[in-house]
Amino acid sequence: MKHFLYITSLLLLLGMSSCTEDFEEINTNPNDPVSVQPSLLLRQVIYDYGEQMSYEGFVAGDLLSQHRTALDFNLFDRHALKSPQLGGNPWPIFYTNLRDNEIILQQAQTNVTFAVYEGPALILKAYMAAGLTDLFGDVPYSEAFNGIDGTVTPAYDTQEAIYTGADGILANLDAGIAAIEAYDDVIPLEGDILYDGDLQAWVRFANSLKIKHLLRISDRVDVSADLQALVNEDNFISSNSDNAVFNFSNTEPNSFRLAQLRVGDFNNFVLSETMETILVDLEDTRLNTFFRPASNTDDFNGLINGIDATSTAAVLGDLSLAGTAFREDTSVLDANFMTAWETSLALAEAAQRGLITADAQALYENGVTLAFEYWQTPLPADYLTGNAAFNNADSSPLEQILTQKWIANIINGYEGWIEYRRTGFPEFMDVQASLNDGLIPVRMPYPSEEEALNADNYQTAFDATDGNSLNVRVWWDVD
């Protein structure tokens, strides 16, 4: 800084009129770069989002989806969602990573050297924006990632616009695919911990996301033609080797976060009675993968969601904790962005509902088989002819499809709860000591920081959601 002041003073003394012409060059520290290589940012965005949302999936998403129950620090499990405790605040995860991804996108669109990053950045933008709006509904979007240019109080966009607008989820998936197909240079995509630079794998990822999100808005928009075109093209994730995932390790800092925290935090989460009932009824051997027998009884025992810990005594030794994959051996665990089993089950639903022409039962059975394989659990020979059969007398095919998707979505962010909100399957149990008038929430509340930092725009969204209520449905959630 002294050097800069000396030069400025000298130039003034010499009477030069262009004293600030080289200001940026003179006042920039070459050892402290002001921009980051897109390869480093891409690696950071994928890992940070995947790691944080996997943790959120365990400690918050699994409570809302009734895969797990919290014994203590369980206001969230009782549906006081405005009081996050061990988790339950995904808002900054989305906005931090969407902001960093926007930097990658801007670099790719303004510097030909980085053009290879445009397609993946557009696909990731669509992926994370969908996760954000599926949880909260209307959110800051079109103005949200321009803080560096002075937009620090962004307006809220409607969920409909975020999905279907010119810079929305579906448009960005198409634009991402187009950017990849138009790319003809030889500079590789680096920092890609999902696909190691395989651009065609990103196209399959994007097409699977299109299937997922077209289905999600199918009660609002006629998506049949678009879905059928994707089926006919047959270029989506169809095997577990194509999955958009990255593996956790068994050692810090890249192990699953629940393996790094104190045992008391891990032991706070046990098998939900809802999950126990469904898996036992199906004679589903993934129960042994997801959970472990209770230490006192050597049986799998779940607990109702949302207990009042001040009046209900729960004995830890009588309840089933999470399986070894979530703590002792997290190398078998993935951060899950999109999979073959989810794609196949989505297509099974589309076929069963008449949105596409395809064999719903074959797609269902393929999806279940892929899900068992994904969770590294042998598929019992009679599983698909027993209670999990597509045409089971006690459940409709649609319920079977969505129940299987729900089971496999354990720790996958908030997906199990989102799909329950969209479809009503599987049937959830009543929360024992609800702090939401006994209602299952249908959206996440906006965080308190929005009220403080973006007051005017927050107020508009507050009014549109009946006072930031948990019980106001998002746009695609048709009653």
Image: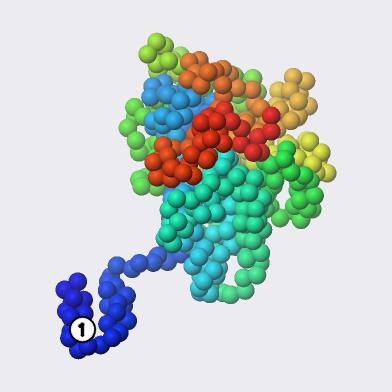
Q: Residue at x 74, y 30 (%)?
A: 398
Q: Is residue 354 above or below residue 430?
A: below
Q: Is residue 470 left or right of residue 310?
A: right
User: Within the image, what quadrant is residue 341 found in?
Assistant: top right
Q: Is residue 194 above or below residue 278?
A: below
Towards the viewer: 206 or 35:
35
Count up the numbered dots. 1
How far from the left and from the top, in percent, is residue 348? 74, 39
User: Within the image, what quadrant is residue 213 found in?
Assistant: top right
How far from the left and from the top, in percent, is residue 113? 51, 74
**Given the image, on which type of amino acid does mark 1 rest?**
Leu
Towards the viewer: 247 or 223:
223
Q: Is residue 415 left or right of residue 149?
A: right
Q: Residue at x 38, y 37 (%)?
A: 259
Q: Residue at x 41, y 21 (%)?
A: 71
Q: Is residue 268 above or below residue 347?
A: above
Query: Which quadrant of the figure contains the C terminus?
Result: top right
Q: Is residue 34 left or right of residue 387?
A: left
How far from the left and from the top, in percent, is residue 279? 60, 24
Query: Which quadrant of the figure contains the N terminus?
Result: bottom left
How far from the left and from the top, in percent, is residue 9? 18, 80
